[in-house]
Image (spheres, rainbow, N blue to C red):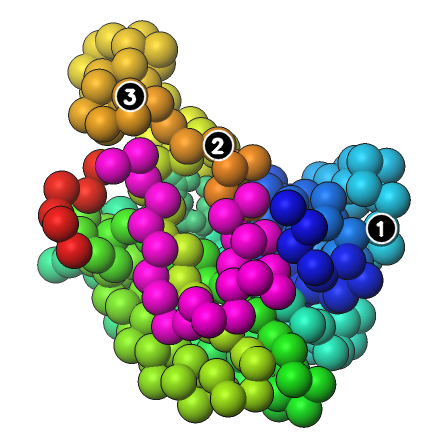
Amino acid sequence: MDLGIAGKTALVCAASKGLGRGCAEALAAEGVNVTIVARTAETLEATAAAIRANAGVDVQAVACDITTPEGRAAALAACPQPDILVNNAGGPPPGDFRNFTHDDWIRALEANMLTPIELIRATIDGMMSRGFGRVVNITSSSVKAPIDVLGLSNGARSGLTGFVAGVARKVAPNGVTINNLLPGIFDTDRIAVTFDAAAKTQNISVDEARKQRMATIPARRFGTPDEFGRACAFLCSVHAGYITGQNWLIDGGAYPGTY
Ligand code: NAD
């Protein structure tokens, strides 16, 4: 299927690795010129070179922390008028809510709620005036089914979800959609750290820890950044203009509810 977005421009945040990279690659494969952002210049440049070589599109790399005003200014200076915005950043650390400090909460809100809101605010009027825009926020399945130790994530991401639910309806008449993608477990570096820790705690191999977790997922596997990216690219396509304000779970059937 031709997604109809060749020649568009996308700003993809937190995209040197993992889910963000999957989104950047899938968009680039559709002919979208991408600006990718991540903190570590070396990894980011390597990703940019790989996307350029594979997709033959323009790829700009902006090494910055997207959760800071300076980082957002640098990203927007490189890509001031994106047609597509993919919001993403590292997730907050787990812990007992009793130990989360005010500063921990502010950091989580900055990264997973206020940064996407600032980037939407900076880019959405341009999308509306051009009559086409796509915003995809990478959130988490924890928005739908909270994970107790991820209180910072549950709270901050739910704040973003509530905010965009209202804005999505406001910008829909101008051809702009805003949707959230909710990953369950995907095979990325972030998840590898979790299984290293689980293996040590339970005194089992990392492979065994992964297998045990996979057995709890109806699909019996973890998701891949590639399939996540392709779902994102479809949401950004011309064919998805009637889908807005939605929270799409991509979790191999792990969420047990009907709705
Ligand atoms: P990852 O560690 O594989 O990749 C994270 C990417 O984000 C890297 O490119 C890193 O450089 C970049 N990054 C992190 N913080 C940044 C910042 N402040 N500024 C700029 N770039 C930054 O992680 P992932 O698994 O791809 O996760 C992406 C998001 O999805 C996270 O918020 C994570 O909590 C969430 N999530 C992931 C899963 C999963 O199973 N992988 C599940 C639910 C939610």
Q: Is residue 35 visible?
A: no
Q: Name the residue located 85 percent from the left edge and 50 percent from the top edge.
A: 57
Three-letter residue code for mark 3: Arg
Q: Which residue is mark 1?
A: 57
Residue 1: % across, % down? 64, 46
Query: 238 left or right of 214?
Result: right
Q: Is residue 247 magenta?
A: yes
Q: Which residue is mark 2?
A: 224
**How far separated are the C-alphas under marks 1 and 3?**
35 Å
Q: Are marks 2 and 1 in contact (CB under 8 Å)?
A: no
Residue 196 is tagged as none
Q: Which residues are magenta?
A: 230-253
Q: Name the residue located 70 percent from the left edge and 73 percent from the top edge.
A: 82
**Figure check: 30 above or below 130:** above
Q: Residues within 10 Å of mark 2 (few under 14, many from 20)?
A: some
Q: Which residue is mark 3?
A: 220
Does label 1 or label 3 sit earlier along the sequence?
1
Does label 2 or label 1 sit earlier along the sequence?
1
Residue 210: % across, % down? 32, 18
Three-letter residue code for mark 2: Thr
**Figure check: 39 above or below 190:** below
